[in-house]
Image: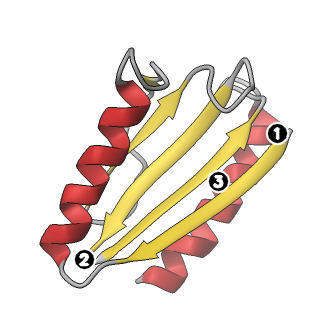
Amino acid sequence: MDLGPWTAVYASDSQAEAALDVLVQEHESVTGWAMERAGRPPYGDEGVSLEGAAYGWDANLLHIWRHANLLLAAGAFGVTATRDDAAERLGSIVEGMDARAS
């Protein structure tokens, strides 16, 4: 299992919102990663959680969310949400990122 955090700061809230839409669309698109929504992370102004094969792994859990003009993402690659230890470790990373963003 690999864990990966990612952040980007945009000039405005609306630019970050548009970037979130594009990032989610690419991960959900059949011509992209074809990942499926697995809920919404309880962080930020808006966001999604995704599961599915991507980045060379058969299973992944990915959280993408936005705080104002800050776009954040964190993923556990090679796992699913049903694997409790991996989801718990990812949750710890996401909570730390979200606390700093707030």
Q: Residue furthest front?
A: 31
Q: Residue at x 30, y 78 (%)?
A: 10
Which label number is shown at residue 68? 2
What residue appears at the point 44 percent right and 51 percent down from the top-left corner?
A: 64
Observer-nearest of 93 and 59: 59
Specify few, some or many for label 1: CA neighbours under 10 Å numbering under 14, 14-19, or 20 or more.
few
**Which residue is located at x 50 percent, y 47 percent?**
63
The relative height of residue 63 versus residue 84 in the rendered view (above or below) is below
Is residue 62 depicted above or below 59 in this figure? below
Residue at 69 percent across and 61 percent down: it is: 92
Q: Which residue is mark 1?
A: 85
Q: Are marks 3 and 2 in contact (CB under 8 Å)?
A: no
What is the quadrant of the C terminus in the image? bottom left
For marks 3 and 1, the one nearer the N-term is 1
Disc 1 element: helix
Mark 2: amino acid: Ala
Q: Which residue is mark 3?
A: 91
Q: Nearer the viewer, residue 33 or 59?
A: 33
Residue 22 drawn at (x, y percent) = 28, 46
Sooner in the amino-acid sequence: mark 3 or mark 2: 2
Q: Amino acid at mark 1?
A: Asp
CB of mark 3 within 8 Å of CB of mark 1?
no
* Position of residue 68 measured from the top left corner of the image (x, y, whole percent): 25, 76
Ranked by sequence position, the earlier of labels 1 and 2 is 2
Q: Are marks 1 and 2 in contact (CB under 8 Å)?
A: no
Q: How is colour applied across the structure in the image?
A: secondary structure
Question: Real-space Cα distance between discs 1 and 2?
Answer: 30 Å
